[in-house]
Amino acid sequence: MIITTARKQIKTLANETERMSRDLGATYFLRDDQSVSTLVNEYKEDVLVVGKDRLTLYPKDGGHPFFYHPNSAMFRVKQFLKTGYDPLVEVGRLQKGMNVLDCTLGLAADALVAKIAVGESGYVTGIEANRILAYLVRYGLYNWKDGQPYLLNAMKAIEVIHQSHFTFLQGCEDESYDVIYFDPMFESNIESIGMKGLKSFAFYDDLTFETIREAKRVAKKRVILKDHFQSKRFERFAFHVIKRQHATFHYGFIEK
């Protein structure tokens, strides 16, 4: 991967970009007047562009670029605060002060809703298997500017860890998280800001019996699975399914 600055911010962002190149083990290139497509075509590498408060990753295969955006989380948070209802909060029985482990962080939309639900006294940890995605989402959560202070503070408070969820779970003590959550990438086409780009870089490791066994050991209250309504995972891993009429996905849970 190579890393460079936005074209109009070369001087102001050069030092930060060089630091990020060291963090990621990426090759730093002076932007000059080259377009991103030129860099991708010439070097056949993914290109990370550092802008003001935003990182954008352009895949070498020509797919959609990835950048952090809170997506539907903004709307879900507002609805939850207005109505007191969110499907994840309800299925997880999330309350103030609880600790939640999101094993499939993605763009952290579910993690953000969970953080709002558990409040300042609760904790939300997100696991991302892809190093660069973990880096970009962590940066995005911390640097996002558009929103009320309570929302921005919640975003900054989400802990992002780069690791496979199975490896992370193996290192956890028994019942160390109240709720453990999985949202594996399913194959139906979901149209949302940033999601097209995410599909180019995300890991698609399926859930295993070993992973679910570890999750049940580490969870104090519930293990939650969000998946396509036609998914066989609910039955395979013995989740109790909460069917949602006209919804593309359902939630399931395993009670401790």
Image: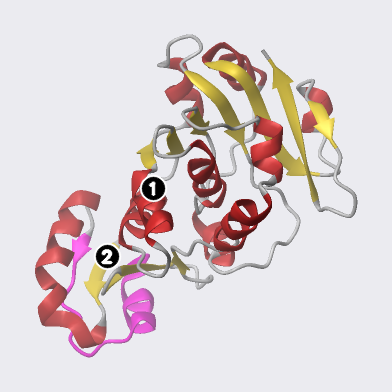
Kindly identify which residue carries mark 2: 2
Q: Which residue is mark 1?
A: 134
Q: Nearer the viewer, mark 2 or mark 1?
A: 1
Separation of marks 2 and 1 at Cα, in angstroms? 17 Å
Q: Residue at x 14, y 64 (%)?
A: 16
Mark count:
2
Question: Magenta span has 35?
Answer: yes
Q: Is residue 172 left or right of residue 7?
A: right
Which amino acid type corresponds to the residue marked 1 in the rendered image? Ala
Q: Is residue 66 visible?
A: yes
Mark 2 surroundings: few (<14), some (14-19) or many (≥20) residues within 10 A: many
Q: Which mark is residue 68?
A: none
Q: Is residue 112 magenta?
A: no
Is residue 10 left or right of 225 when viewed as pictured? left
The one nearer the camera, 76 or 142, is 76
Query: SS at mark 2?
Result: strand
Residue at x 40% of width, y 16% of height? 171
Q: Position of residue 190 (x, y in %)?
A: 70, 62
Q: Sequence-wise, which precedes: disc 2 or disc 1?
A: 2
Amino acid carrying mark 2 in the image: Ile
Q: How is the image coloured?
A: secondary structure
User: Toward the viewer: 62 or 104?
Assistant: 104
Q: Is residue 187 left or right of residue 206?
A: right
Residue at image point 39% right, 47% down: 134
How far across and down, in percent of the image, does residue 146 sit? 40, 70
Circles 2 and 1, Cβ within 8 Å, touching? The answer is: no
Residue at the bottom extreme of this rendering: 33
Mark 1 secondary-structure assignment: helix
- Give the side of residue 2 with respect to residue 22, left or right: right
Q: Which residues are magenta?
A: 27-47
Residue closer to the observer: 26 or 194: 194
